[in-house]
Image (cartoon, rainbow, N blue to C red):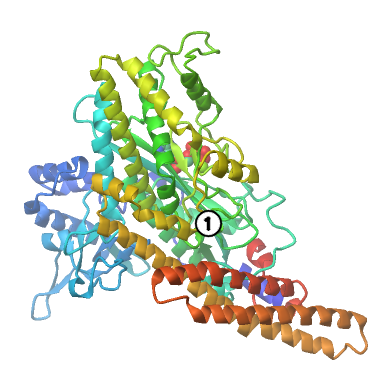
Amino acid sequence: SQDLEVTSAARNWRVEATEQPSPGALVNDLFASDVLTLEQLKARLSKPDYRSLQATVERGQSLDSSIADTVALAMKTWAMEKGATHYTHWFQPLTGSTAEKHDSFLNPAGDGVAIMSFSGKELIQAEPDASSFPSGGLRATFEARGYTAWDPSSPAFIVRHANGATLCIPSVFFSWKGEALDLKIPLLRSTEALNAAVTPALKLFGASGGTRVSSSLGAEQEYFLIAEEYYYRRPDLIMTGRTLFGAKPPRGQELEDHYFGAIPDRVLSYMTDAEMQLYALGIPVKTRHNEVAPGQFEIAPIFENSNIAADHQQLIMQVLRTTARKYGLVCLMHEKPFAGVNGSGKHCNWSMATDRGENLLDPGDTPSENMQFLFFCTAVLKAVDEHQALLRACVASASNDHRLGANEAPPAIISVFLGSELSDVFSRILSGEGGSAASGGLMGLGSQVLPEIPVHAGDRNRTSPFAFTGNKFEFRAVGSSQSISFPITVLNAIAADSIRQLTADLQARLDAGRDMDAAVTDVVRETFRKHQRIVFDGDGYSEAWHLEAEQQRGLLNLRTTLDAIEHLSSPQNLALFGELGILNERELTARQEIMYDIYFKTVNIEGETTEYMAQTQILPAALKYLGDLESVQARSRAAQGLGQEVTRLTDELYDALQVLRAQNEALGGDEVHEKAHHMRDQVLPAMQEVRRAADALERVVNNKYWPMPTYRQMLFVK
Ligand code: ADP
Ligand code: MG
């Protein structure tokens, strides 16, 4: 049957051209072999030039342009040794993906001679034809120029393809007025803001001068794999990244047999191949396993400085996507490719650390370390409570709406999970008891060590969007397909803002003559009292929590993207980003406009794809089946009954389709906000009705007639 043919094609995979390095022995040689590290540059630059570059890379000093030519030459030589023929400024426009425009090193020198060259000017700045990148109004046509500039804080690397390689130079992207047109500039600015806010606080806790602080980030990437054969038979996957139709298979994830199960051979081969490439790129991928839903997997690197982590996260997605094809697979990064089974997220584990590697969210072993820890931890609680809307907005997208606020992990309501140990510490500080029952002693912050707070190996509370996990916070609302740059920017910004305020508070108390121990205790107690409503350790899915959160605690429940991004340009957020020098008003509202626009376009494409598939694939298949049933209806009661059912469902499908067609046509207005609301309020519900009828038909129509692979096939054939 067709079912069998498709299935055997889908199972057919072989790896031809990959030369797998033998894992194990080679891995440490392989690591970062395609990265132009400082170590590499040191060997290729004069001492003074190297020191100058090092000051830029490690201490954020501005680049001395007189060394650009020598650095460019060193880069070109290194890249050509690696087989590179081209270079590109590699940047992160506001689309959320990465962009590259390749230029060859080749330069004709007359009379059939060519030289390979790369100048300092070319290294430092380029002007891609930028008019087609979204700018949210930042760049009118008359000022269409956009520039990319080398970001020396992230190392250059080589990306290989079958016939060569390209030198990729991490870059930022901005308008001729110097306004950020990308996701990287605000991220870098937020790192500066965090450093500026945290170092004065650390000084009060006794840190030496010259300490630099940045955030650290480890992102756990979830994804689905399906056979390529199926992918090409699903217009919805090709057009939208998710299935717009598909009846729930008899078996989903309820047996819980996939999570952490043995990884199928084909998938494991794929993962290993991808990991080898990621190692070469210096990306410390560490963990791989099956996820909850059938066909769902996860990869997680070890955390890094968040600027580097953001670049690496983009590369992880890219390598996962491209490598899948070699194995006859397609990697789906969409937040909800299949209804009825778990969606995919990208848990962002975030902390703050000094340049000496001290983790500021690690409770530590001494009373003074504890005091410092509680100060920063409390600052994060305050930050999350005060900026719920912004946290929700920075993960808002049409695709992530299928996770957040849709009865799935995590909910759209932002709250913080602390765990019982830390909750207990805070409640004792709050009550002023100060006594630790366990140790019997007094727990003035400075005089007693905190109870041991375990670092959790697994997700203890999967339902919380923002969880403390022993020495870091885990922001779980981030979507699997999205760039982590903006969420990190937001985390850095709100933490900086909150730490700045608490530091001023602490300083004022010290100035008034309080001793450090008492002053910190006061700040922590008062801040916690004000913001404790944000702490919730219970079941985030439950209806009871939704009621409590909204009605008793007054927490925001911004269910959809449009509810959330409305808040982006609030006076509070304009002030936050403005004061910290991260985004000015134009830059922030531009981002908001782009989010509306992407939301509208995403759902619009889904609406039209739904219409197309229902009209040209599903309806004809059902009608054909109906026709065939009719030929035997005189003789068969079964055919009569079935015929009635198919007739009813086909009519329902037809009616729902008329509604959808009208809504697709209508568009809701001229202006992007109106269009976006039309999509949410009219098109999505109309799509849902079409799907309901179509999925019901899938369950009764002869499988041979069904025009596309089913969930049963896509999720289970490996
Ligand atoms: P879990 O599986 O419970 O979520 P893990 O300890 O396995 O937690 O860590 C998950 C991710 O958190 C990894 O990417 C890890 O590197 C990262 N991580 C650990 N410590 C930190 C930290 N201090 N800052 C940022 N990320 C961290
Ligand atoms: Mg986790």
Q: Is residue 463 above or below residue 335?
A: above
Which residue corresponds to the image point at 30% horizontal and 69% vertical from the top-left? 133
Residue where numbered disc 1 is placed: 223
Amino acid of disc 1: Tyr
Q: Is residue 646 above or below residue 104?
A: below
Q: How far from the left and from the top, in percent, is residue 630? A: 83, 89
Identify which residue, 666 or 124, lies in the foreground.
666
In the image, 558: left or right of 617? left
In the image, 66: left or right of 223? left
In the image, 539: left or right of 422? right
Q: How far from the left and from the top, in percent, is residue 311? A: 34, 53
Q: How far from the left and from the top, in percent, is residue 640? A: 88, 83
Q: How far from the left and from the top, in percent, is residue 579? A: 24, 45
Which residue corresponds to the image point at 40% horizontal and 44% vertical from the top-left? 387
Give the SS element for disc 1.
strand
Q: Is residue 115 above or below residue 616?
A: above
Identify which residue, 282 or 435, lies in the foreground.
435
User: Which corner quadrant of the figure contains ligand 1?
Assistant: top left
